[in-house]
Image: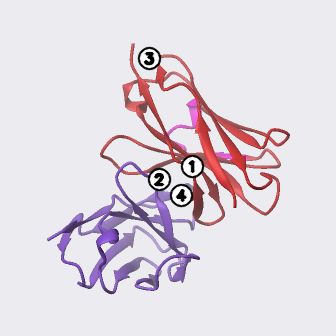
Chain colours: A red, B purple
C-alpha cells in the first residue's frame, strides 16, 4: 500500500529556508488523479494546509503563505518537496505530507521542524 | 476563505456513550466535508469523506451526516481507542480548511 515519509532538517535558523521532501513508496506518484499536499501543525494547535502539487507540476498554495512557499515534484524519484522561505518562530511545527483527492487519505508520520538560532 | 467551526471544543464521555461532534462551515460546501481522528504524536487518520462515506477500514460505529453548512460526526458507542482529537475539513473550495478540533476525553 502507498506510504509517505517526510525527511529534512529538524532545525532551521530564522530568515533561512525550510526544505522538506516527501518520498512516496508502494505506488507511483504519477498514478491516479491525486494531488500531493503539505500540511502543518504547531504544537498543541490545529492543522493548516500549506499547498499542493499535481504530477503535471501545477500547484496551489495557501494565500496566507503563498509568497514564501514553493512545492515541486520529482516523478523519477517518486518525491515531492516543500520550500518555505524567510522562516520565523511562527513556522515551528510538525510538517506532514499527504495524498489529496477531495480528502487527505494517506499521511506521512510527520516531521518536527523548529525555527531557532 | 471558508471558515470551519467545530463544537464542542472538548467533550468528556464514557466507554459505550454516544458522542456527537458538529462542524459548521461559514458558507455552503455541499457535501465536500471530511472528518479525521488524531491521536497524540500521530498523523491524522481519515474517517469520513464526502460528508457521510466511511473510509475503508474504519469501524461502522463512526458515521457522518449533513450538507450545506452543518455537519455531524457520530460515534455510536465510544470505545477506548476512540479517545482522540477529531477535525473536520472542507474540500469544496480553495484553500482547504480544517476546523479547530474536538478533543474526546475520558469521563
Q: In which quarter of the image is residue A70?
A: top right
Tag 2 and tag 3 share a subunit: no
**Which label sits in the foreground, 4 or 1?**
1
Q: Which mark is residue B96?
A: 4
Q: Earlier in the sequence, mark 2 or mark 4?
A: 2
Span highlighted in magenta in the image: A59-68
In the rendered view, tell whether residue A103 sits above or below residue B22: above
Q: Earlier in the sequence, mark 1 or mark 3?
A: 3
Alpha-carbon span between mark 2 and mark 1: 7 Å
Mark 2–mark 1 CB contact (< 8 Å): yes
Pinpoint the chain carrying mark 1.
Answer: A
Q: Residue furthest top?
A: A117
Residue under pointer 3: A14
**Which label sits in the foreground, 2 or 4?**
2
Residue A74 screen position, x and y as percent: 79, 38
Residue B51 screen position, x and y as percent: 50, 79
The residue depicted at 40 percent of the width and 79 percent of the height is: B71
**Which label sits in the foreground, 1 or 3?**
1
Image side of residue A92 versus residue A25, left or right: left
Alpha-carbon span between mark 4 and mark 1: 18 Å
The residue depicted at 30 percent of the width and 85 percent of the height is: B77
Residue under pointer 1: A108
Q: How crowded is mark 2: few (under 14 residues within 10 Å), some or many (20 or more)?
A: many
Amino acid at each position: 500500500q502507498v506510504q509517505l515519509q517526510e525527511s529534512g532538517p529538524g532545525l532551521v535558523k530564522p530568515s533561512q529556508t525550510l526544505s522538506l521532501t516527501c518520498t512516496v513508496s508502494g505506488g507511483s506518484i504519477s498514478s491516479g488523479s491525486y494531488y500531493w499536499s503539505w500540511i502543518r501543525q504547531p504544537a498543541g494547535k490545529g492543522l493548516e494546509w500549506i499547498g499542493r502539487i499535481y504530477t503535471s507540476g501545477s500547484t496551489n498554495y495557501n494565500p496566507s503563505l503563498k509568497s514564501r512557499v514553493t512545492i515541486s515534484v520529482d516523478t523519477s524519484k517518486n518525491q515531492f518537496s516543500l520550500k518555505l522561505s524567510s522562516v520565523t518562530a511562527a513556522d515551528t511545527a510538525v510538517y506532514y505530507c499527504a495524498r489529496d483527492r477531495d480528502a487527505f487519505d494517506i499521511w506521512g508520520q510527520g516531521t518536527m521542524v523548529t525555527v531557532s538560532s | 476563505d471558508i471558515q470551519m467551526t467545530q463544537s464542542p471544543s472538548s467533550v468528556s464521555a464514557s466507554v459505550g456513550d454516544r458522542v456527537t461532534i458538529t462542524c459548521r462551515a461559514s458558507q455552503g460546501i455541499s457535501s465536500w466535508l471530511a472528518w479525521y481522528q488524531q491521536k497524540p504524536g500521530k498523523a491524522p487518520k481519515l474517517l469520513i469523506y464526502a460528508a457521510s462515506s466511511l473510509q475503508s477500514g474504519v469501524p461502522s460505529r463512526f458515521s457522518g451526516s449533513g450538507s450545506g453548512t452543518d455537519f455531524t460526526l457520530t460515534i455510536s458507542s465510544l470505545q477506548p481507542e476512540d479517545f482522540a482529537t477529531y477535525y473536520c475539513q472542507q474540500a469544496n473550495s480553495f484553500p482547504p480548511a480544517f476546523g479547530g478540533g474536538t478533543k474526546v476525553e475520558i469521563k
